[in-house]
Image: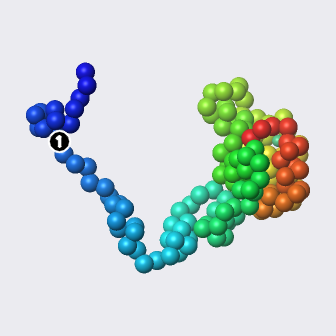
Amino acid sequence: MLFLSSDCSLLGLCYVIKSRAPIWHAETQSESVEYLWTRRWEQSEPRNKDLIKEPFKKVPGWDGTRAIWTTLNRIRTEQGRCNYLLHKWGMVGSPLCECGETQTIKHMVESCPITMFKKGLTKLHEGGPTAIKWLEELNTRL
Ligand SMILES: [Zn+2]
């Protein structure tokens, strides 16, 4: 059965849902986009928040290959293909890493004796040649 808008008036069901943030309010603000992004960033609590100093700028690696870009973002947000998350989603039998610890993205980058990026998360975030090489040589696709 096809439902037409004229049907709702017959049934007395029509009402308009008001937007909590109508677009015309955003367009008339006098603050700059950079200020608004910075304020919103300061009010939020994303993982590894300290990596991003200027939230209105593109993060390093955005101009690289898609594989590198997505992997860097998965590491920054700690939401990639690791045994901890795969186990949580019922896709693998164990959350453990080959080294015996729980395999989170943070573990893989910062403390795993097998996969650790020795220069640290901040250097990895910057996406320099050493970071790109590490990402390419990583056995696991995050
Ligand atoms: Zn490990």
* Residue 77 drawn at (x, y percent): 65, 52
* Residue 17 drawn at (x, y percent): 25, 49
Vertical placement of residue 86 versus 75, above or below = above
Residue at 74% in and 61% down? 60
Q: Nearer the viewer, residue 60 or 121?
A: 60
Q: Residue furthest top?
A: 1
Residue at 33% in and 60% down? 22
Q: How was this image coloured? A: rainbow
Mark 1 CB in 8 Å range of ligand 1?
Answer: no
Q: Residue under label 1, please give it.
A: 14
Q: Nearer the viewer, residue 71 or 49?
A: 71
Image quadrant holding the C terminus, namely: top right
Count numbered badges in the picture.
1
* Residue 6 drawn at (x, y percent): 16, 35
Tell me the quarter of the picture where residue 129 sits: bottom right
* Badge 1 amino acid: Cys
> Can residue 121 be spotted in the picture?
no
Image quadrant holding the N terminus, namely: top left
> Can residue 92 be spotted in the picture?
yes
Vertical placement of residue 34 versus 47, above or below = below
In the image, taking residue 100 as reference, residue 4 lies left or right, namely: left
In the image, taking residue 116 as reference, residue 75 lies left or right, namely: left
Vertical placement of residue 59 versus 38, above or below = above
**Dot 1, crowdedness within 10 Å: few (<14), some or many (≥20)?**
few
Label 1: which secondary element = loop
In the image, taking residue 4 as reference, residue 115 lies left or right, namely: right
Tell me the quarter of the picture where residue 97 sits: top right
Residue at 80% in and 50% down? 109
* Residue 72 drawn at (x, y percent): 74, 51
Q: Quadrant of ligand 1?
A: top right
